Amino acid sequence: MSHDVDWRRQGPSMEHILSRKDRFDVELFEKTKLEDLYRNIPEYMELEEKFGIRSTFFFRTFYENGDVLDYEDDIKQLHESNWEIGLHTDPTSIDNLEKIQKEKEKLESITGKQIIGNRVHYLNYNSGLPEKLAKLGFSYDSSLRYSKDRIDDKEMGYSRINGIIEFPVTLMDAYLFTYMKIQEDKIISEFQKALDLGRSLSENNVISVLWHDNVLKMKGGRMYKQILEFLTSQDDVEIKRGVDLVKIFS
């Protein structure tokens, strides 16, 4: 289970939010500050604590009109409470070992601990990435996705590529709503289908979920609580951080 933190801590501009006003219930604007509509880390922590789970948060080190240091208190609180912190690498860095290293070191300067998980912003994966990540001490990556509009066994499980364990993204809020056109009341059904497909596989029955930090108050994204209720009700499902999976498969 993972969350990408795509936006600066102060959130996007007022113009950006208002142009997407239809993604939210109208009453939210009456009781929520605009800058808090996209900021949901405390709410994720509260929900996951309630269900007894921990997940991975991938943070960028370059934010438009912001800085990862604005998230310093959030990152430290997550880390100290046993959530995993991963690097959300900038797409412009993936062909440059030194740039990735600088991003990694910047995030590690906040956590005080080695970062072993990576996901490139926009899932901008290329074949040379795993080798670079391995050289820098990463253990796993989760930037791979083969299609935007369907879920099949290629989007499940894991593979080993040049010293890196690769977990493809199976279920992502943006793809479910934007490309697959799944309605809010059908989200749990999609998770059920993905689980059933995973159960049918003799191997690679790992399903990687990406639920962005900013969607928790949006239509569709607000189903996260119901998703956790569903997943934790399944006897054969365990919700893990990326680092937990690495320990299992190493």
Image: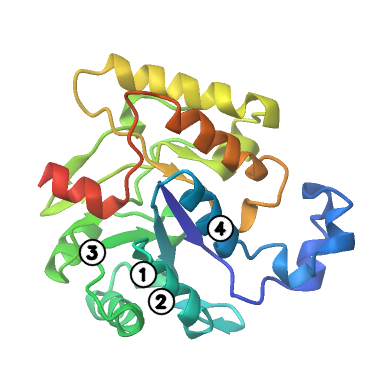
Q: Quadrant of residue 121?
A: bottom left
Residue occupying the point 35% across, 78% down: 107
Q: Position of residue 138 (x, y in %)?
A: 19, 64
Which residue lies at the image location 48% right of the left edge and 50% below the top edge? Answer: 48
For disc 3, the marked residue is 116
Q: How far is mark 4 from mark 1, CA to CA?
A: 16 Å
What amino acid is found at the position of numbered circle 2 in the picture? Lys
Q: Would you say 28 lies left or right of 70 here?
A: right
Q: Residues within 10 Å of mark 1 (few under 14, many from 20)?
A: some
Q: Secondary structure at mark 3?
A: loop
Please tell me which residue lies in front, 174 or 219. 219
Q: Secondary structure at mark 2?
A: helix
Residue contact at pointers 1 and 2, CB within 8 angstroms: yes
Number of other residues with Cα within 10 Å of mark 2, as a class: few under 14, some 14 to 19, many 20 or more: some
Front tag of 4 and 1? 1
Q: Nearer the viewer, residue 193 or 119?
A: 193
- The residue tagged 2 is 76
Instruction: Give the class, few, some or many, for how many residues have Cα within 10 Å of label 4's Cα (few <14, many ≥20).
Output: many
Residue carrying label 4: 213
Vertical position of residue 247 compared to residue 9: above or below: above
On residue 79, the disc is 1
Given the image, on which type of amino acid does mark 1 rest? His
